[in-house]
């Protein structure tokens, strides 16, 4: 063998080893075939997995000539792969033409110009994980050094495949842990689906009512005459009626999903630290398997009202999300802490991973949003957390750790030893008079804006799709809105930036803001809203809550439950947890 070929094989093995040592799973057998065809005279190759049955997993350079059938070539290669897997050793055929009687589809393989075939099992501790089948034009091409090279590639593949298998098993175990029992998992996800359907279902109902009103007006104009217009209006009446039935069915389905998703455990006074400690008993083995260091600290008397199973699910989801995010860090670490934070109790879950990009904070609590930088725990996990926390009258903030990484802060209303709320609620903004009111809705989602405009009738509602468009209206001294419904995340400048500008020019109008958001908040947005004293609502916005803002305030009036904790003037200097302030690792 020439020194150039040896060097090429060495380089190929080095590249393959680096690829297989990477954290990402999948594609191992295809990479092995590429390396083998690049550094051996093999004409083509097929890889077969051995997970219960020998099945094709990858192939390279099989003929596409119309007179040949690749499926038959695969069957022939598969029969050799089954022999090698059964015998747990290499199988070498020096001339396939002599194997026509014993080898399936040997004629088709020979028609490729192939004479010699090598089937090499990929084994880890005597367990066959896969088989590689290489086809050569002549048996002389397959010398001993080439056979050893093939065996070396298979050994590397065995280590990588076993690693991937263990990772898959760990993910299955983790998914079982995350579920906290099948019923709990189904309930939480069902509640999330129902929550997502509630907004479009409500929009459909409002739009149907508007359509019915328009059709009724057309009927009055058309009269009872048997004309083309009268016939068209009659047809519209029928279509509107059918649509009403369909909309009612959608609303009924949403209600059923909501009832299925409701937790059976009652709302009780509980210690958030105890809930978190119990959840970490389940999560700790997973962190150990991933090589993640865990720091825990649970302050006493972190009392709130809630369901322990649902809040335990929040802890697990946030911890697994943090683990996925930091597992590639040089010294992966997760911090879990509970503490009292003024009128709230605080759950902090932090990691030293890549952090959450500021532009992603708006989206990470949306269903099925994925961020590769945050690891593999994408999908409904964070959305479930957001929904559960909102149902408990709290909210989630996303912070950036000073030393790198992400911090998820869950704030819930604190109660005393008797279960009385320590939260001093802020009454909704009101001008103190009834009648027809002026409302400005600022949202870049046209469906949401139109739905609110219809739902807030008979009040006069204007809409703006961006902060700049809204700023022009709000800085006009002749425009006096009684209520400003402002989305936190907007194109260009976010809602808190708009509010700041309005507060400088027209402070009275700034007091009439109600912020809305679809999920979590960044630290900048959350701190600003707290200090502003403006209420905040979680999407989909409850129309009754907005209409309540437009009625005169009574002394005992309360803001709507979702995210009302944002109205509290908590400290904006909540530090993230640093390693040196924590006790020794418990792992």
Image (spheres, rainbow, N blue to C red):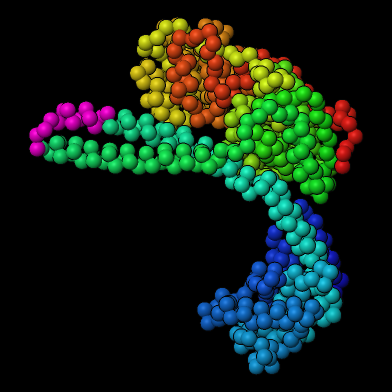
- Check the image and report above or below for 167 versus 471: below
- Check the image and report above or below for 96 versus 59: below
**Residue 447's x, y, as percent?**
43, 32
Dominant secondary structure of the residues highlighted in magenta in the image: helix
Residue that appears at 51% across and 38% down: 258
Q: Is residue 99 left or right of residue 247?
A: right
Q: Is residue 187 left or right of residue 4?
A: left
Residue that appears at 42% across and 33% down: 202
- Position of the C terminus, as image quadrant, is top right
- Position of the N terminus, as image quadrant, is bottom right
- Check the image and report above or below for 337 versus 524: below
* Res. 117 image quadrant: bottom right
Question: Residues in magenta?
Answer: 213-226
Residue that appears at 75% across and 35% down: 276
**Residue 32's x, y, as percent?**
74, 66
**Residue 369's x, y, as percent?**
59, 41
């Amino acid at each position: 063998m020439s020194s150039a070929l040896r060097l090429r094989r060495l380089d190929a093995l080095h590249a393959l080893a680096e690829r297989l040592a990477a954290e990402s799973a999948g594609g191992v057998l295809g990479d092995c075939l590429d390396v083998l065809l690049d550094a051996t005279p093999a004409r083509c190759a097929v890889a077969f997995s051995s997970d219960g049955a020998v099945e094709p997993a990858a192939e390279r350079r099989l003929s596409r000539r119309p007179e040949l059938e690749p499926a038959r070539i695969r069957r022939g290669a598969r029969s050799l792969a089954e022999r090698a897997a059964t015998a747990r050793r290499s199988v070498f055929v020096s001339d396939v033409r002599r194997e026509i009687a014993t080898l399936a589809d040997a004629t088709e393989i020979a028609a490729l110009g192939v004479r010699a075939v090598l089937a090499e099992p990929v084994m880890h501790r005597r367990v066959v994980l896969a088989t590689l089948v290489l086809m050569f034009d002549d048996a002389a091409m397959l010398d001993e050094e080439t056979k050893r090279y093939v065996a070396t590639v298979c050994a590397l593949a065995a280590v990588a495949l076993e690693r991937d298998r263990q990772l898959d098993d760990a993910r299955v175990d983790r998914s079982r842990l995350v579920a906290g029992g099948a019923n709990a998992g189904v309930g939480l996800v069902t509640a999330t689906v129902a929550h997502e359907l509630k907004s479009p279902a409500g929009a459909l109902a409002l739009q149907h009512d508007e359509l019915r009103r328009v059709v009724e007006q057309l009927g009055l104009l058309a009269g009872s005459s048997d004309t083309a217009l009268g016939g068209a209006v009659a047809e519209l009446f029928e279509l509107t009626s059918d649509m009403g039935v369909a909309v009612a069915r959608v609303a009924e389905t949403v209600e059923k999903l909501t009832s299925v998703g409701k937790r059976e455990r009652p709302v009780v006074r509980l210690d958030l630290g105890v809930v978190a400690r119990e959840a970490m008993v389940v999560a700790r083995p997973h962190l150990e398997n991933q090589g993640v260091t865990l720091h825990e600290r649970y302050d006493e008397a972190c009392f709130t009202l809630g369901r322990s199973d649902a809040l335990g699910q929040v802890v697990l989801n946030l911890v697994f999300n943090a683990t996925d995010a930091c597992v590639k860090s040089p010294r992966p670490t997760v911090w879990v802490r509970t503490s009292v934070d003024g009128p709230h109790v605080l759950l902090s879950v932090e990691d030293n991973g890549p952090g959450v990009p500021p532009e992603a904070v708006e989206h990470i609590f949306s269903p099925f949003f994925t961020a590769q930088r945050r690891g593999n725990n994408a999908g409904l996990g964070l959305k479930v957390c957001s929904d559960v926390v909102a149902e408990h009258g709290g909210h989630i903030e996303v912070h950036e750790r000073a030393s790198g990484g992400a911090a998820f802060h869950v704030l819930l209303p604190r109660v005393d030893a008797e279960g009385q709320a320590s939260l001093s609620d802020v009454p909704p903004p009101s001008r103190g008079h009834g009648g027809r009111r002026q409302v400005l809705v600022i949202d870049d989602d046209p469906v949401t804006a139109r739905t609110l405009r219809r739902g807030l009738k008979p009040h006069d509602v204007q809409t703006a799709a961006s902060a700049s468009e809204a700023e022009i209206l709000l800085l006009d001294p002749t425009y006096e809105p009684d209520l400003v419904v402002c989305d936190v995340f907007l194109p260009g400048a976010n809602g808190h930036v708009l509010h700041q500008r309005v507060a400088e020019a027209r402070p009275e109008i700034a007091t009439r803001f109600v912020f809305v958001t679809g999920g979590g908040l960044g630290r900048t947005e959350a701190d600003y809203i707290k200090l502003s004293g403006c209420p905040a609502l979680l999407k989909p916005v409850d129309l009754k809550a907005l209409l309540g803002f437009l009625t005169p305030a009574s002394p005992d009036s309360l803001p709507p439950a979702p995210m009302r904790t944002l109205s509290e003037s908590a400290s904006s200097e909540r530090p993230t947890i640093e390693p040196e302030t924590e006790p020794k690792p418990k792992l």
